[in-house]
Amino acid sequence: ITIERLKREYGIELVIGAPQVKYKGITGKGEEINILNPTIWQDNFKEVLEPWANLKLIISQKYLGNVFELLKDTAGRHIESKPFSKERYLIEYKIPLREIIGNFYDNLLNITQGYASMTYTEIGYFKADLVKLEILINKEKEEAFSKIIPKSKAYDEARKLTKKLKEVLPAQLFNLAIQGKIGGKVIARETVSATRKDVTAPLYGGDITRKKKLLEKQKKSKSKLQAKARVNVPADVFLKVFGS
């Protein structure tokens, strides 16, 4: 609602990005750099630290299985579980902050039908094995889609994001390549097929050679356009990607 009102009343196009935590990168000289967003990332960091939190959940006993299943997919570490009252349980975890700033709370409410409470306290920074995932659209880096993620999840995240972009990006007059890249290496790729125009439609029957020439000319034109074009990503694409 807020985005639509800003666009309609003030002509402001907001770009929606993924939530980020503050990481710390240690250079070879021992300098500490605050990584507030992926643009600050350096592939040659000697060490990377990420914030962890102490997470406490109070839930109904009948949803224990669902909640533990949700927590199993995180990098968190179980501390304890104990009765909080007659029908409720307290679950305590140590967990990377990045795991809970996104959709974690929404997912928690979904699997407990809204009967859950959550609190967390930051407990410090710890060493992490992280990489920067970059997204290229028509070979141009689209920094808004860049993410800092665990190295172990890089391939799955790249496949997931490129596939989602293929679904929501509008087709162009040329084949649109979407690539997921880490450290200069492409690890995932999808292609949005070009919109098709039948350039042979005006030809009723006739010489097949003429049709082939028209199709070849169209192919060359699309290749030139693809080489020069800069794809503008509509604002609603960001909302569809990060809102899902």
Image (cartoon, rainbow, N blue to C red):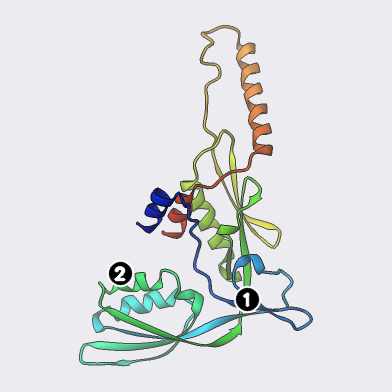
Q: Residue at x 50, y 47 (%)?
A: 234
- Front position in the image: 38 or 192: 38
- C-alpha separation, residue under disc 2 versus residue under disc 1: 30 Å
Callout 1: helix, strand or loop?
loop
Residue 206: x and y, percent? 57, 6
Circle 1 residue: 129
Instruction: Indicate the amino acid at tag 1.
Output: Asp
Label 1, residues with CA under 10 Å away: few <14, some 14-19, many ≥20: few
| Residue sticking out furthest to the top | 206
Q: Residue at x 54, y 56 (%)?
A: 159
Q: Nearer the viewer, residue 41 or 82?
A: 41
User: The N terminus lies in which quarter of the figure?
Assistant: bottom left
Circle 2 Cα neighbour tier, 10 Å, few/some/many (<14 / 14–19 / ≥20)? few
Residue beneath the point at 60% across and 58% down: 143
Q: Residue furthest left?
A: 86
Q: Is residue 56 left or right of residue 192?
A: left
Q: Residue at x 46, y 47 (%)?
A: 168
Q: Position of residue 233 (x, y in %)?
A: 53, 47
N-terminal-most mark, 2 or 1: 2
The residue type indicated by label 2 comes to: Asn
**Residue 192 position within the rendered picture, expressed as x and y whole percent measured from the top left:** 54, 42
Q: Quadrant of residue 223?
A: top right
Residue 58: x, y in percent?
31, 85
The C terminus - image quarter: bottom left
Q: Classify residue 191 as left or right of residue 118.
A: right
Q: Find numbered disc 2 in the image and state the secondary structure of the residue it sits on.
A: helix
Label 2 sits on residue? 110
Q: 212 or 138, which is in the foreground? A: 138
User: Do callouts 2 and 1 mark residues in contact (Cβ within 8 Å)?
Assistant: no
